Amino acid sequence: MSLRARMTAPEKSGGGREDSHMVATYRAKLLEEIDLAEMSSLAAADRRARLERVLSHIISREGPVLSTVERTQLIRRVVDEALGLGILEPLLEDASITEIMVNGPDQIFVERSGKVEQLPMRFSSHEQLMQTIERIVSTVNRRVDESNPMVDARLPSGERVNVIIPPLSLSGATLTIRRFPRAFTLQEMINVGSLDEQMLILLAGLVQAKLNVIVSGATGTGKTTLLNALSGLIPDSERIVTIEDSAELQLQQSHVIRLESRPANVEGKGQITIRDLVRNSLRMRPDRIVVGEVRGGESLDMLQAMSTGHDGSLATVHANNAEDALMRLQTLASMSEIKIPFEALHDQINSAVDVIVQLTRHADGSRKITEIAVLDSHGRDPYRIVTVARFDAQPMDAEGRINGEFNYLPLPRKIAERLYMASQPIPQAFGVAESAEQLATREAN
């Protein structure tokens, strides 16, 4: 079998030992001839170029006769193994891939355009996968072994990485890399059909009028992307504090303080939680607080901040619809060490939350705002969620696409008055409900 066949077939069928042995052999020869001290002083691009030149000389001197394509493939794979992340390196360079999922050495999945697909490639062994994982976590001064079998971290380049290894993972070492999302504007989201112009006008008014907004959705629906786009509507003159587990938000305003939580070290010390950061942010004189995701007791601190002078705050939460979002916030707030009756938490949510924006990822991979709802209840009244915009989907068409239309409903007068007092327009497509009876009738229909 030719080298090209040996190098191409593994990519398609899962990798052969002969191919891996050749890569390992030339990697060892390469390491014998380079000066590690000299390499460490070079920039990343220069380091790769240097290794490629040295390896090219080695192949010319000792290697088999290769075509240009075969030679390029071999050099690329050997340098990726020596310097990068091996077979994952091309995936990280592919801008169309948003998530890389490695389920043991034999299964590699990626997400493209909202759809998950398995790739015809594999690691040659569990040891090679572990070497790749160790190289990744070492860049953030972490380690993974049986005593510390889980790692969740952000790489210097921005990707979010999660690792879990045996004995916790029964299918072998598992690696998940979520790519740093590109900062989309709301106009770009309109262009891909995630919302429309009327919804943009409404959302811009709600943010400018300093209503508290919760972005809700399941995993992978684009909550962080939308949160980042909405934060772009905050005036540049305001002081914004962002709080995240893994820093992904890319605000463009000039007065932004970015805070990121920190896990415990190998001795189990030094952990700084989202809740610690939310509490500290209240002492930093913020005009707005933006929390990447509330998932625990910090929900209570966030709600208290929203209802005590920090209007216009933004946060995301995992939930499947607007009502679930409120119930999840209530459950998360109850996880605080401060024991507060559910009735009091209910009151707190009614006071703090103004708007819920629900995101959904459809079967065709498209992500859309499927509902904008406002909370029109008070005190300990039952939650009264008023939908003001929604996406009505149609069945998937013959080409596998989900189509539908955005529909609009009158705004509650309380919300309309806040927009008016902030000199924000009320989109004509919505209008204003004249009475609570009209809202009730509308909801019944």
Image (cartoon, helix red, strand yellow):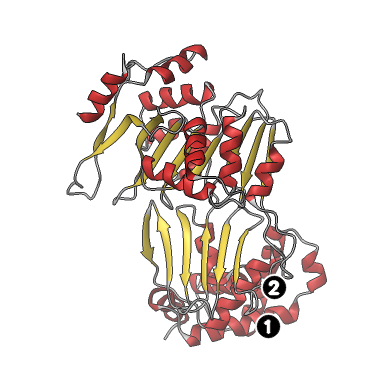
Say which of marks 1 and 2 sits in front.
Answer: 1
Circle 2 Cα neighbour tier, 10 Å, few/some/many (<14 / 14–19 / ≥20): some
- Left or right: where does residue 169 sit relative to residue 28? left
* Residue 117 percent coordinates (x, y): 36, 63
- Note whether residue 249 is visible: no
Residue 135, placed above or below residue 247: below
Residue 438, placed above or below residue 375: above
Say which residue label 2 marks.
Answer: 54
Circle 1 Cα neighbour tier, 10 Å, few/some/many (<14 / 14–19 / ≥20): some
Numbered badge on residue 175:
none
* Residue shown at 64% from the left, 78% from the top: 145
- Left or right: where does residue 123 sit relative to residue 51? left
* Residue shown at 36% from the left, 43% from the top: 321
* Residue 395 percent coordinates (x, y): 19, 45
* Residue shown at 69% from the left, 64% from the top: 139
Say which residue label 1 marks.
Answer: 29
Mark 2: which amino acid?
A: Val
- Note whether residue 275 is visible: yes
Mark 1: which amino acid?
A: Lys
**Sequence-earlier tag: 1 or 2:** 1
Q: How many labels does the image show?
A: 2
- Secondary element under disc 1, as helix, strand or loop, is helix
Q: Nearer the viewer, residue 336 or 22?
A: 336
* Residue 330 percent coordinates (x, y): 48, 45
